Image: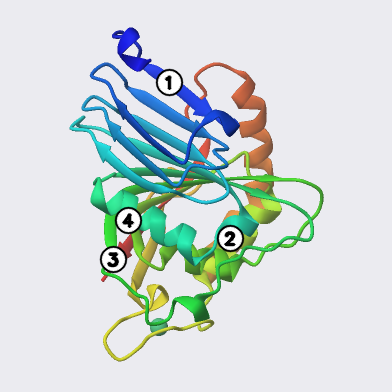
Amino acid sequence: MITSFPLLEHLSLGGRMLQEAIKLSSQSLKEIRFNDCMKLVEAEVDTPNLQSFKYSGKTIPRLYLNSVADYRTAEFSALLEDMDSLWFTRLYNFLRDFKFQDLTIEMCSIPGREIFFNAEDSIGKQFPHFEFNNMKLGMLMFGTTSINYASLLDGLFWNLRPRILSFKLSLIPKILKGLLKCLVAEGPNCYCSQNLDCWRHSLKGIKLINVKGLESNTVLNAMTLNNLTNYLDDWVIEVKKGLLEKNFPVNSLSLELSWC
Ligand SMILES: [Zn+2]
């Protein structure tokens, strides 16, 4: 039916209506969104002008994309419990194959369900790293849950090397602090092998970008993290108020990561 809408720019598909495999071709589409596609195992999207690709669902299907747009963003939403090795592998393949430079991951945490990624399962399944510009993280939380930050970071950085890592400040401060603390932690969970350095040992430095009250380019480590967390709560409250205002400029905490 898509040929009947030659001017269509934003398309959202979802639910059980979708078949296992879909093929879609459009010159005009700029944004496509797949929501909760239960049966989808393969999607081929021939959309040269596509700028924004969004996907949410239990598993990531095999995705083929033809887009030559200069600037392309990808957004994947998932429950933490569904983020297993295959999920991260499919994500990596998609970003690398179609050269995305901008990725947003919206995670959702449900009480009693942990992230599925287990680094032990991925040892030996290391691929070349994919370097890209920006990884932005958001998290929705239902009830009180504990998050295995180490596993989450292992999954995120196993094969992905973003230059900028951003956290949405809609994250609750406890999670934001948990992630930051785990990010700067020294020592734990090293997976270096004979030929490959693990992400912790490839991560050479972290700097803060545009953090109110702290100098830009401040190195983030266990010590400066203390200064940061001291006023992070206030900042998050300020941002939450600010989000209600239009065009509030800073709604994320950004870090510059350098990798070797
Ligand atoms: Zn290591």
Give the distance between the C-alpha atoms of the residues marked 1 and 2, in whole angstroms: 34 Å
Nearer mark to the viewer, of 4 and 2: 4
Where residue 187 appears, as percent x and y from the top left, is: 51, 84
SS at mark 2 in the image: helix
In this figure, which residue is indicated by the disc labeled 2? Answer: 179
Label ID, residue 129: 3
Give the distance between the C-alpha atoms of the residues marked 3 and 1, in whole angstroms: 31 Å
Nearer mark to the viewer, of 3 and 1: 1
Task: Out of 244 and 78, give the one closest to the viewer.
Answer: 78
Q: Mark 2 belongs to which amino acid?
A: Leu
Where residue 67 appears, as percent x and y from the top left, is: 22, 33
In this figure, which residue is indicated by the disc labeled 4? Answer: 93
Where residue 209 appears, as percent x and y from the top left, is: 40, 47
Mark 3 Cα shell of 10 Å, populated few (<14), some (14-19), many (≥20): some
The residue under the point 32% across, 50% down is 95
> Is disc 4 in contact with disc 2, using a CB cutoff of under 8 Å?
no
